[in-house]
């Protein structure tokens, strides 16, 4: 049996194990695969019924910080109409060993199938007690510095301390500081270094952003953004980061958008990846759609997308489809 029979394909939160052949009485355990902080295994056992197990690899990390997982697991027929058996969503289940999650399936199965696991969240117990913490919220939280200087910058914006320029969004205005804007953005720096109307009138018009998205953009520039605001306005922040050349914000948006691709947002993210030249996001979206077969789950939306998408992007998608088909 080839090594590929044990390999699990993954994206940031999705794992798929393709089973091409399973004897009438058999046990098979996958190679380890990385999701979040942990290495994981899938296992299948076929006797009178089929049993599927998902569990983290035994390690010091698993023993000290066992994952508390929320996920959806499906069994997908890999041929024909790709019909699926779907287990009810698992919510905040602590997994330590191979007996913590077992899915027993009584429906007889033959031929090829895919075990598809979509991780909705992974948490660990808080070292200080209280509610468990999502590992996917830690990155942004750690970036929020508690240093006095950063807190003071945030107060300068929120309390309008000695503001000297006004930003007009589509539905409101915010007072801000040209020195801070110029330090964080080459585009703003250029505006204030030349005799442009923004310098003369002490106003900047950003009519393509709502006041809430604009406030999130400024809060990021001042080092005072909250994780919920960042997640809510990621696409608007990406647009602003590209327009005003705030490179670290563009990187932060790119990394965040890579983390939670799903069928509801993959087409929008693919379009934005193409528009803002984010090759890693584009590749991840196309792999999710094509290699992981999710384009079959959103046939109508995918068809509509192809009718209006950029020609070069369509060509790349079909190249990806041809590449995957050659591999079968």
Image (cartoon, rainbow, N blue to C red):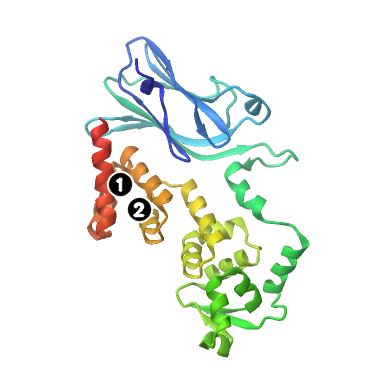
Q: Which residue is mark 1?
A: 298
**Is 222 drawn above or below residue 293 in the view shown?**
below
Cα–Cα gap, marks 2 and 1: 10 Å
**Is 223 drawn above or below residue 64 in the view shown?**
below
- Is residue 263 among what the camera can see? no
Toward which corner of the image does residue 38 lie, by quadrant?
top right
Q: Nearer the viewer, mark 2 or mark 1?
A: 2
Res 176 label: none
Res 267 label: 2
Q: Residue 220: percent from the left, percent from the top?
A: 60, 64
Q: Residue 301: percent from the left, percent from the top?
A: 29, 52
Toward which corner of the image does residue 29 lie, by quadrant?
top left
Q: Please tell me whether mark 1 sits on a helix, a strand or a loop.
A: loop
Q: Residue at x 72, y 78 (%)?
A: 161
Decide which of tag 2 and tag 1 comes sooner along the chain: 2
Q: Please tell me whether mark 2 sits on a helix, a strand or a loop.
A: helix
Q: Residue 273: percent from the left, percent from the top?
A: 39, 56
Q: Residues within 10 Å of mark 2 (few under 14, many from 20)?
A: many
Q: Residue at x 36, y 9 (%)?
A: 25
Q: Residue furthest bottom?
A: 200
Q: Residue 96: percent from the left, percent from the top?
A: 60, 25
């Amino acid at each position: 049996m080839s090594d590929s029979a044990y390999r699990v394909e993954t994206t940031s939160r999705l794992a798929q194990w393709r089973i091409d052949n399973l004897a009438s009485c058999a046990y098979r355990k996958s190679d380890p695969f990385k999701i979040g902080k942990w290495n994981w295994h899938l296992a299948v056992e076929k006797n009178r019924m089929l049993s599927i197990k998902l569990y983290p690899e035994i390690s010091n990390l698993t023993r000290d910080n066992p994952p508390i997982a929320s996920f959806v697991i499906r069994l997908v027929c890999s041929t024909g109409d790709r019909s699926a058996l779907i287990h009810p969503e698992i919510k905040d289940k602590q997994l330590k060993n191979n007996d913590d999650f077992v899915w027993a399936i009584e429906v007889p199965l033959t031929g090829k199938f895919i075990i598809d696991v979509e991780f909705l969240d992974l948490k660990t117990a808080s070292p200080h007690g209280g509610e468990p913490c999502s590992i996917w919220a830690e990155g942004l939280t750690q970036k929020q510095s508690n240093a006095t200087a950063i807190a003071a910058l945030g107060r300068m914006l929120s309390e309008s301390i000695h503001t000297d320029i006004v930003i007009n969004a589509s539905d409101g205005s915010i007072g801000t500081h040209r020195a801070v804007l110029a330090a964080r953005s080459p585009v703003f720096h250029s505006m204030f270094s030349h005799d442009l109307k923004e310098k003369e009138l002490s106003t900047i018009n950003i009519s393509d952003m709502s006041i809430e998205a604009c406030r999130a953009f400024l809060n990021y520039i001042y080092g005072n953004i909250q994780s919920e605001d960042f997640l809510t306005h990621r696409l608007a922040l990406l647009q602003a980061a590209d327009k005003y050349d705030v490179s670290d914000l563009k990187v932060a948006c790119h990394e965040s958008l890579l983390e939670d691709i799903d069928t509801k947002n993959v087409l929008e993210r693919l379009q934005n990846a193409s528009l803002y030249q984010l090759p890693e996001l584009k590749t991840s979206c196309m792999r999710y759609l094509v290699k992981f077969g999710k384009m079959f789950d959103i046939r109508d939306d995918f068809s509509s997308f192809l009718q209006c998408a950029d020609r070069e992007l369509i060509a790349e998608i079909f190249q990806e489809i041809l590449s995957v088909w050659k591999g079968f």
